[in-house]
Structures are given as structure tokens and as C-alpha cells.
Image (cartoon, rainbow, N blue to C red):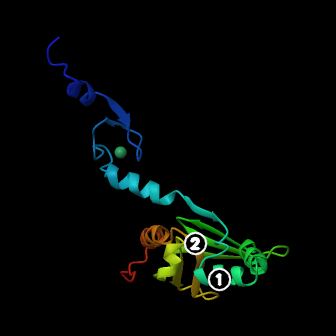
Amino acid sequence: MSGTSPEAVVKDQYKPCPACGEGIRLTALKCRICGEDLVAYAEKLDAATEKTFFHGHPAILPGVGHFAWVVLTLGLAWLGYFYRSRSVTYIITSHRIVVETGLLSKRRRNLELYRVDDLELDRPFLQRLLGCGTVILHSSDRDQPILALRGVEDADLLFEKLRDCAKSERSRAGIKTLTEA
Ligand SMILES: [Zn+2]
């Protein structure tokens, strides 16, 4: 039983190529039949799958000023802020941003990420203490060229994700230029 090291066993195993379906080595990085780069192919598939990053409302009290008003009005302002927060729903995915406004009659707006030209992150020091921030998107969308996602938690993380996704969505859509942020 010589020559059957674990490496040799793996080398002799085959899998179907995800692009053409022909049998190729388990360890192959490139398909010997169709020539597909398997790493690039997996990345393409991953980018094509829509993932939801956030589905919910903006923070009720996104800033320290809001806290101050709640204290000053003995809690009354909180009701107003609560109502305002609940009347907005953000659905943020790797492909698009949907903003629903209104509690009873809802208005739905949709921004495809491939239309996003530039992103800004607004995190004033006091908002940062509360873990909130605003992500501002500049896009070629005619109805809303500027969309601000206000009072979102982990705003810097969301900003990074949206920047990466806007870039890959643009290349998927065949648009080359994106202002480097
Ligand atoms: Zn193949």
C-alpha cells in the first residue's frame, strides 16, 4: 500500500465543474475542459446572490440632541421620535436599498446599488457614542439622486459593505467608473 498518502487520495478525487459540469480534480483551480477560472466563477456567483444586510427601522434616538429633548420634555418627545422611527423601514441588501415610509399608507422607494456613484459616511462624535451614523448615497437615480440612511446602527460597517457591493454591482452591470471613496 505504497503511494496512497492523503494528498494522493485527494488528488484522485473528482468533482463536477460548476460551469460546464464535466468531471475535474477536486483541487483544480481552473477547469481543464472549459477553461473557467473556478475562483473567479465562485466570486461571480456569490455577487449574483442577493444578501440582506439590514431590515428594520432607524434608531429612535440617533443623536445626543434627541436624548436631551426627551429629558427636557419629560419623555413626551420620545413618542414623536418613536413614531418617526417606526414610520421608516430600511431594507438594505447587496443589490438594492428599499425605503418604505408611512405607517398606514406606505410609500416604497427603490435604489439599485449599480446606480450609486459615491457614498459618504456622516458620524459626528456624539452620534458615534451611541453607535449610530448616517450613510449618504449619491446616485444616478433621477427621482432621488441623494438618499440618506439616517440613524443606522454600525454605520461604518454598513458603509464598507455598501461601497463594496456598489462596486461589484457596477461591474456586474458593466459600468466601469466608480469614484474611489
Ligand atoms: Zn468546466
Secondary structure type for disc 1? helix
Judging depth in this view, the residue of 153 and 16 nearest the camera is 153
Image coordinates of residue 108 in percent, x first then y, are 72, 75
What's the residue type where badge 2 is placed? Val
What's the residue type where badge 1 is placed? Ala
Q: Is mark 1 within 8 Å of ligand 1?
A: no
Q: Label 2: which residue? A: 152
Q: Is residue 116 visible?
A: no
Q: Nearer the viewer, mark 1 or mark 2?
A: 1
- In the image, what residue occupies the spot 28% across and 38% down? 27
Q: Earlier in the sequence, mark 1 or mark 2?
A: 1
- In the image, what residue occupies the spot 65% across and 75% down? 61
- 3D distance between C-alphas at marks 1 and 2: 19 Å
Give the image quadrant in which the ligand numbered 1 is located: top left
Image coordinates of residue 93 in percent, x first then y, are 57, 64
Image: 72 above or below 23: below
Q: Label 1: which residue? A: 68
Q: Residues within 10 Å of mark 2 (few under 14, many from 20)?
A: many
User: Left or right: 48 with respect to 148?
Assistant: left
Image coordinates of residue 55 in percent, x first then y, are 64, 63
Q: Residue furthest top?
A: 1
User: Left or right: 44 with respect to 126?
Assistant: left
Image coordinates of residue 149 in percent, x first then y, are 59, 78
- In the image, what residue occupies the spot 31% across and 43% down? 33
- Residue 100, quarter of the rendered image: bottom right
Q: Is residue 94 visible?
A: yes
